[in-house]
Image (cartoon, helix red, strand yellow):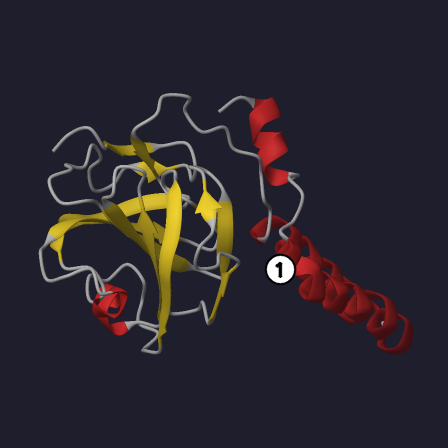
């Protein structure tokens, strides 16, 4: 990545979810520093800078070619395997390819829609806070699952999963929303995982260990059945 691109990534505007954290960090720096000395000032500054970095929300340019499934999050692939979609989405018992993307605290945490379509269902499932890079995190962890109906009638599931540190999943999408590939739809705070379940018959084009760029990296082609 070129220096200019790296700087744009680091200095990207923060997601709106950062606002209370930035206000809190600034308050600690200004008030705590003025009343109790330099330690709290620098602590507040460090926390504010961390939040600016963690909540950064860079612009992404989805590929122009239609019929693609894009990565719903930044991070690296930790699992590519057949699995059943979350039962709460009512998408049936048929297994389909699931791609799991782990987000460390250093990754951009804004989630993006993987394809054009309509949101047909959103379901929140309370659960555990296991390390998000474990396979069992898909079934046992706190999660927010979305079903997306594609223009050709097939469907995709995208699941925001809380991790060992992440304790808050935010989703801005609503049932009935018409969305496009690359659209922002939420954020998971402080380390997490995002799973995507492809339509039956569609084969992944990525492998475990690959690095993903949300809204840009191609996971699969929908024409492949």
Q: In the image, 109: left or right of 17?
A: left
Residue in front for this viewpoint, 176 or 3: 176
Q: Judge by depth and name the residue closer to the eye, 192 or 104.
A: 192
- Residue at 44% across, 55% down: 176
> Looking at this rendering, what residue extends furthest in the right direction?
34
Tag 1 secondary structure: helix
Q: Left or right: where does residue 205 sit relative to residue 75?
A: left
**Corner quadrant of residue 63:** top left
Whole-percent x and y of residue 151? 32, 38
Q: Residue at x 23, y 62 (%)?
A: 134
Q: Which residue is under mark 1?
A: 17
Residue placed most toward the observer, 118 or 15 = 118
Where 44 sits versus 204, above or below?
Answer: below
Viewer-proximal residue among 46 and 148: 148
Is 87 left, or right, of 67 in this rendering?
Answer: left
Q: Is residue 216 left or right of residue 36?
A: left
Q: Quadrant of residue 138?
A: bottom left
Residue at 35% from the left image edge and 78% from the top image edge:
126
């Amino acid at each position: 990545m070129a220096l200019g691109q790296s700087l744009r990534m680091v200095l990207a505007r923060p997601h709106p979810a950062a606002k209370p954290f930035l206000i809190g960090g600034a308050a600690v720096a200004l008030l705590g520093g003025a009343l109790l000395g330099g330690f709290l000032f620098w602590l507040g500054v460090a926390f504010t800078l961390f939040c600016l970095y963690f909540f950064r929300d860079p612009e992404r340019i989805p590929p122009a070619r239609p019929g693609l499934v894009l990565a719903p999050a930044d991070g690296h692939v930790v699992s590519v395997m057949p699995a059943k979609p979350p039962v709460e989405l009512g998408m049936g018992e048929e297994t389909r390819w699931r791609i799991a993307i782990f987000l460390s605290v250093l990754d951009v945490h804004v989630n993006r829609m993987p394809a054009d379509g309509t949101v047909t269902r959103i379901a929140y499932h309370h659960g555990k806070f296991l390390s998000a890079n474990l396979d069992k995190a898909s079934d046992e962890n706190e999660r927010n699952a979305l079903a997306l109906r594609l223009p050709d009638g097939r469907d995709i599931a995208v699941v925001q999963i809380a991790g060992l540190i992440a304790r808050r999943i935010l989703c801005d999408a609503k049932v009935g929303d018409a969305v496009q590939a690359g659209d922002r739809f939420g954020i998971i705070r402080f380390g997490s995982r995002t799973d995507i379940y492809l339509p039956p018959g569609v084969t992944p084009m990525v492998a475990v260990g690959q690095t993903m760029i949300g809204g840009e990296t191609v996971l699969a082609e929908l024409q492949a059945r």
